[in-house]
Amino acid sequence: MEKNNIQQKIKSLYESWAGESVTSILPLTRTASSRSYFRITSATKKAIGTYGPDPKENKAFVAFTKSFYQKGLPVPELYAEDLSAQIYLQEDLGGTTLYRFLSENQGAFSEKSLEMYQRVLMGLARIQIEGGKNLDYSLAYPRPDFDRQSMQWDLNGFKYFFLKLAGITFDEQALERDFNTLIEFLLSADQQYFMYRDFQARNIMLKNGVPYFIDYQGGRRGALQYDLASLLFQPKAGIPFAIREKLVAYYLEAIAEMIPVDREKFMDQFYGYVLIRRIQAFGTYGQRGLHERMAYFMNGLPVALQDIKWVLDHKVLSVQIPELLRVLRAAIADPRFQPDGARPDNKFLTVRVSSFSYKFEHPVDPSGNGGGFVFDCRFVHNPGRYEPYKKLTGRDQPVIDFLNKNSNMADYLNNIYQIVDEAVENYIERKFTNLMVSFGCTGGQHRSVYAADMLAAHLEQKYGVNVELRHIRQEEKGWVN
């Protein structure tokens, strides 16, 4: 369905539900999701409109939401749906995810962060245990259970999309034997609970300090340990290992009030689920990062591998999986996947990244090299053509959401990353000290600003080079960068 048609159908559904005319409909960003989300407002009401291209996924989400909401679980209220058009409206829980909360509370993992995670874990225990009772798992998509087949899919993704693409050699027969051993071990855990499947900080909304859960359409029946592993071992959450163990203990106390728990058996199986959750993510890193060359998906890989290293160094699994552990150790030791602290110091290279307007002054290269890359953003869909964005810049979230959902900006940037990365690697090898990259658009306000910010962050994260960032047109208008 075309984007304009999607928005029109969602607008009609909203006005039918609200009894009011829509005053604003803005696209929202959902990384790595094929669904489209919109924040809709009218005179006295607001909602999140969703278009999902997969009818079975939509049906699962709608049914699960109704069941959870009836039980008083912390999920958005479902306002209206038109599954024939693949759209539905749900409660607007605001814009603060747990991930954003953590980003705004940078530094040491604070007492405030610990308390928030405890609230999240209490909610998780409830949705797994209470929410899983009498749930119609026949609607779960793509399978009703996290069973042998589901695990095999994840393990094969790791083998073919990560190990093979990364060039890490393995004994296929020995690895398959270890896969089967790990699967049997994991299936020995109690499998009767709701398993969220993608329980991570971006799928947890905070409204008035209360955690709410979203995006559980991939949920199915499974073990409690998987979601706990998914949350506590999310690479970018930055939870210290000692705090993780405290949070596991808190979670065990929470579920012990609802069901009998064999704590020793639970913990033995927990680190097995940490392994398979990370292994599933490595398959995604490989497919989207190594194969499709989407740089965003590679940023968390070094941290994820260090999490696995900690598990292998500190925990003893009660199963023998030597070939699997060997290839994991090989990935951990691979120089390409080292964390920032293990990289060489590349600060001798300065990359000057600028945004500018083609109508005004173009960037000047102060290094004496005569310039560098200049990329034209003017063919990218321009949010500046629309009234809600005219006074905003490429750093404002509505503009970012627009560019990510209503333009080819992501593909554009990935192509640029490939070009610039090759130059940066060559310059580092040759000990060159200066490189210049500029982005131009019509006004130097939206597209070029966002593109320059994204490239600057990409180069700092990937190479640790010295980045000097300027937004020429915005600075001329008095904006402090």
Image (cartoon, rainbow, N blue to C red):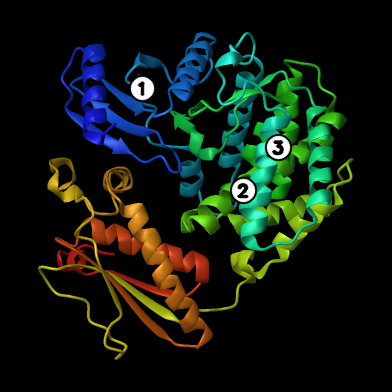
As drawn, the residue found furthest toward the left would be: 359
Instruction: Judge the density around disc 1: few (<14), some (14-19), many (≥20) Cα neighbours within 10 Å.
Output: many
Residue 140 appears in which quarter of the rendering?
top right
Q: Earlier in the sequence, mark 1 or mark 3?
A: 1
Tell me the CA gap for discs 2 and 1. Answer: 29 Å
Residue sitting nearer the eye, 384 or 282? 282
Q: Which residue is mark 1?
A: 86
Image position of 66 (left or right of 411): right
10 Å crowding of disc 2: few (<14), some (14-19), many (20+): many
Left or right of 47 in this view: 269: right
Q: Amino acid at mark 3?
A: Gln
Specify the label residue 152 is tagged with. Answer: 3
Left or right of 17 on screen, residue 478: left
The x, y position of residue 45, in whole percent, is 25, 20
Q: Position of residue 195 (x, y in %)?
A: 64, 26
442, above or below 382, in the image: below
Describe the element under mark 2 as helix, strand or loop: helix
Can you tell which mark lies on residue 283?
Answer: 2
Q: Quadrant of the N terminus?
A: top left
Asked which quadrant contains residue 34, the reply is top left
Tag 1 near tag 3, CB within 8 Å: no
Could you give the CA–CA distance between mark 1 and mark 3, rounded to whole angstroms?
A: 30 Å
